[in-house]
Image (cartoon, rainbow, N blue to C red):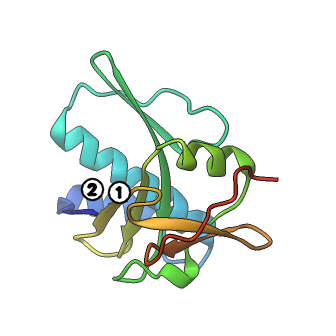
Amino acid sequence: MESIAVKLTSSQFSKLNSLFNQSGKSADVGKRAVEIVKIYFMSKNPRCTFPVPPSGVDLVVQENRSRKKLEIKGTSELNIAWGKLGVSGCPSFDKLKKGMPLYRVTGVFEETPQIYVLRFKKDFRMQKEPRWRIVQTTSNKQEPRTCA
């Protein structure tokens, strides 16, 4: 898995704090994680854009003629926190199985959050529960063929 440290400027950090504070709401953690991933891509290519994502996708990154679709999950924890990592919904499940990367943003309230780029089968598998839980890959267990 790829690991990327994102050093936020004081301006970026202040803006994130004003938009998404540490309220404890998971929606704020998730929205802040998406913004951190946007900051990362903008630091690589200031001309990239972020078109409206389709169902099952949290962020689309448009760079020149290339489009990347991403699933993004954030946590205030400083590690991946596998036990708290889950995917709800068949559209996300299907796209992850077909190769869409999962960007896990840890330490979302820190000045230097970490992004882990995770790939299905290589870094994680999905275990059916009331929603799909992300589990670190440690065996060659059979994966379900469909979301249903």
Residues under labels 2 and 1: Cα distance? Answer: 5 Å
- Number of labels in the image equals 2
- Residues at circles 2 and 1 in contact by the CB criterion of under 8 Å: yes
Can see residue 20? no
Query: Residue 19: x, y in percent?
Result: 47, 58
Q: Amino acid at mark 2?
A: Gln
Q: Indicate whether 107 appears above or below 13.
A: below
Query: Residue 69: x, y in percent?
Result: 46, 37
Determine the residue positioned at 29% across, 48% down.
39
Give the SS element for disc 1.
Answer: helix
Determine the residue positioned at 30% across, 75% down.
110
Q: Amino acid at mark 1?
A: Lys
> Which residue, given by chain and number where applicable, does mark 1 sit on?
15
Asked if residue 71 lies left or right of residue 36, the reply is: right
Q: Indicate whether 52 appears above or below 128.
A: above
Query: Residue 25: x, y in percent?
Result: 62, 73
Please state, as top left, top right, bottom left or bottom right, where the N terminus lies in the image.
bottom left
Query: Residue 29: x, y in percent?
Result: 52, 68
- How many neighbours does mark 2 have within 10 angstroms: few (below 14), some (14-19), or many (20 or more)? some
Residue 112 quadrant: bottom left
Q: Nearer the viewer, residue 64 or 48?
A: 64
Give the SS element for disc 2.
Answer: helix
- How many neighbours does mark 1 have within 10 angstroms: few (below 14), some (14-19), or many (20 or more)? few
Q: Indicate whether 136 appears above or below 56.
A: below
Determine the residue positioned at 20% across, 31% down.
46
The residue at the far top in this view is: 65
Residue 75: image tag: none
> Which residue, given by chain and number where applicable, does mark 2 sit on?
12
Q: Indicate whether 15 appears above or below 82.
A: above
